[in-house]
Amino acid sequence: MNLTQELFKCSKEIARARSTVAPSVIAQPALTQLQNLIKTEAINQIDRSLVIQSGCGMGSFADVPWIVIRDKKASINATSGFYISILFSKDGQRTYIALSTAAGASPTKALKKSDFELIKKRAGELKEVSKQFIKSDYFSDLPVGLASDKPRPKAYTAGVAAYKEYIVDDLIKCNEDNFRYDLINIVQGYISIVNSGFGKIEPPEISKNQCYKFTNLHISNFSSYCSSLSYEFN
């Protein structure tokens, strides 16, 4: 199975979906198919505990559909922590595989300048740590080109620490399975970063004095942590 060719097919299906009345009906199956192939053809050979999921928007179609590969020790869900992301640009010309810090929840909420600054700060910290584990050709001073000025894609851009770019029309010309090679390398680097302890998620601590003083926030945080440990489809 050539994952580079499968990435090309998925990128083209997403581009085709944008011109239809119900783009998610076309795009999400394409994303799910690629997601499943990545899981069975590559990820399971590295670490079967990694979670992989995808999305193309809630309600309206997303400018930048995505696939995320994450370790539960570093990310509770696709809006927290840090992970590997595959991002499909709005103009359909470029696709990226990236080491990313999460853009946060509430995609309908307007992001403030301070939000972007925090995302960039976290991405910068992740970038410095990742240089110990990921090859130098994944790093660039140029931002990813997602071709969208909307807050969510801009947050994705701000959160990228390392990446490889693919020109979609060039993918069909590849004789080698470059995407598989790049995917395996960056996922192995990601696992090493997680194992180093960077960004490790710990269960919320509650002191003895707080034992009988649970707040809604304590319950919510603890429930989120517990749900990340079980009952999750891999």
Image (tube, helix red, strand yellow):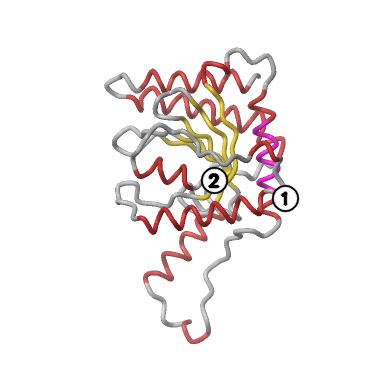
Residue 150 falls in image quadrant: top left
Q: Which x, y percent locates residue 197?
A: 67, 60
Q: Which element type, helix, strand or loop, lies under badge 2?
A: strand
Horizontal relation, residue 26 to residue 189: left or right: left
Q: Which residues are magenta?
A: 182-191
Q: Residue furthest bottom?
A: 209
Q: Find disc 2 in the rendering and name its residue.
A: 100
Look at the image and tell me in which quarter the N terminus lies: top right
- Residue contact at pointers 2 and 1, CB within 8 angstroms: no
How many neighbours does mark 2 have within 10 angstroms: few (below 14), some (14-19), or many (20 or more)? Answer: many
Residue at 61% over, 60% down: 200
Q: Nearer the viewer, residue 158 or 101?
A: 158
- Say what amino acid the circle numbered 1 marks: Gln
Q: Which x, y percent locates residue 213?
A: 41, 81
Q: Which x, y percent locates residue 15?
A: 40, 21
Is 79 contained in the magenta span?
Answer: no
Q: Which element type, helix, strand or loop, lies under badge 1?
A: loop
Residue at 50% over, 47% down: 159
Q: Find disc 1 in the rendering and name its residue.
A: 132
Examine the residues drawn in magenta and state their main secondary structure.
Answer: helix
Q: Nearer the viewer, mark 2 or mark 1?
A: 1
Q: Which x, y percent locates residue 58?
A: 33, 39
- Say what amino acid the circle numbered 2 marks: Ser
Q: CA distance from mark 2 to mark 1?
A: 16 Å
Q: Residue furthest front?
A: 141
